[in-house]
Image (tube, helix red, strand yellow):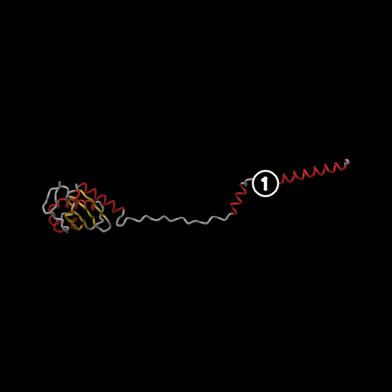
């Protein structure tokens, strides 16, 4: 092989190596571009091109239903009625709802109840408690009902139910009625089987 042929072969080899190197560089560049993280501008452009998410309706909160037969005003007056009963040493409970009745459950703890005469002192104190809260602005009822209980703590029995109209109580409070006139206007119910055979002191 002469020198001219050697130079030609050498040039072809150099050219081939250069071509291979160029191809490798192009491939490496393409891979780098493919795996390079997107720029902030590219991300923003992609997000802008995306369709907006579907609108979701804001859920409407379900209102809390009120307790039947009550209101804040009734509950406040019921609390005041309980306080007035307690101030008169009446053991029991009270309820004031939208049926226009102030209902008291009174438990006689110091004497057995045979009839209205036995219960009358406690009933009068209960009616006074009803008038007290009426005068304080709790004019939310037109009648007062007092259920009278007595007996041992584990066997308390309803003896009487006494009903009074608020108009009669107001006249009594104003001095238009005496106590006997008020008692004559009370509606007294005695539950069946409520009367004991004999009055016994509560242990």
Would residue 39 appear left or right of 4 to someone viewing this image?
left
The quarter holding residue 178 reads bottom left
* Secondary element at tag 1: helix
Give coordinates of residue 75: x percent, y percent.
29, 52
Within 10 angstroms of label 1, few (less than 14), some, or many (20 or more) residues?
Answer: few
Give coordinates of residue 151: x percent, y percent.
16, 50
**Residue reaching furthest to the right:** 2
The quarter holding residue 180 reads bottom left
**Residue reaching furthest to the top:** 3
Quadrant where the N terminus sits is: top right
- Work out whether residue 184 can be spotted: yes
- Work out whether residue 188 can be spotted: no
The quarter holding residue 5 reads top right
Position of residue 20 relative to residue 68, above or below, is above
Would residue 21 appear left or right of 127 to someone viewing this image?
right
Would residue 2 appear left or right of 38 to someone viewing this image?
right
Give coordinates of residue 90: x percent, y percent.
19, 48
Count of numbered marks? 1
**Residue reaching furthest to the left:** 198
Would residue 13 appear left or right of 88 to someone viewing this image?
right
- Using the image as rendered, state which of residue 69 and residue 25 is in the foreground: 25
- The residue that label 1 is drawn on is 31
- Using the image as rendered, state which of residue 5 and residue 14 is in the foreground: 5
- Using the image as rendered, state which of residue 155 and residue 133 is in the foreground: 155
């Amino acid at each position: 092989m002469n020198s001219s042929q050697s130079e030609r072969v050498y040039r072809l080899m150099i050219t081939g190596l250069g071509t291979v190197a160029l191809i490798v560089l192009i491939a490496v560049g393409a891979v780098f571009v493919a795996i390079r993280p997107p720029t902030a501008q590219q991300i923003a452009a992609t997000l802008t091109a995306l369709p907006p998410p579907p609108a979701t309706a804001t859920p409407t909160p379900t209102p809390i239903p009120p307790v039947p037969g009550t209101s804040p005003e009734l509950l406040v007056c019921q609390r005041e009625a309980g306080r007035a009963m307690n101030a008169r040493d009446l053991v029991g409970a009270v309820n004031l709802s939208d049926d226009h009745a102030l209902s008291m459950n009174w438990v006689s703890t110091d004497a057995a109840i045979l009839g209205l005469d036995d219960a009358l002192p406690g009933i009068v104190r209960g009616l006074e408690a009803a008038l007290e809260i009426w005068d304080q602005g709790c004019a939310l009822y037109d009648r007062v009902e007092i259920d009278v209980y007595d007996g041992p703590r584990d066997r308390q029995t309803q003896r009487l139910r006494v009903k009074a109209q608020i108009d009669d109580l107001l006249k009594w409070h104003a001095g238009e009625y005496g106590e006997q006139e008020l008692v004559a206007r009370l509606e007294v119910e005695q539950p069946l089987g409520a009367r004991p055979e004999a009055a016994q002191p509560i242990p």
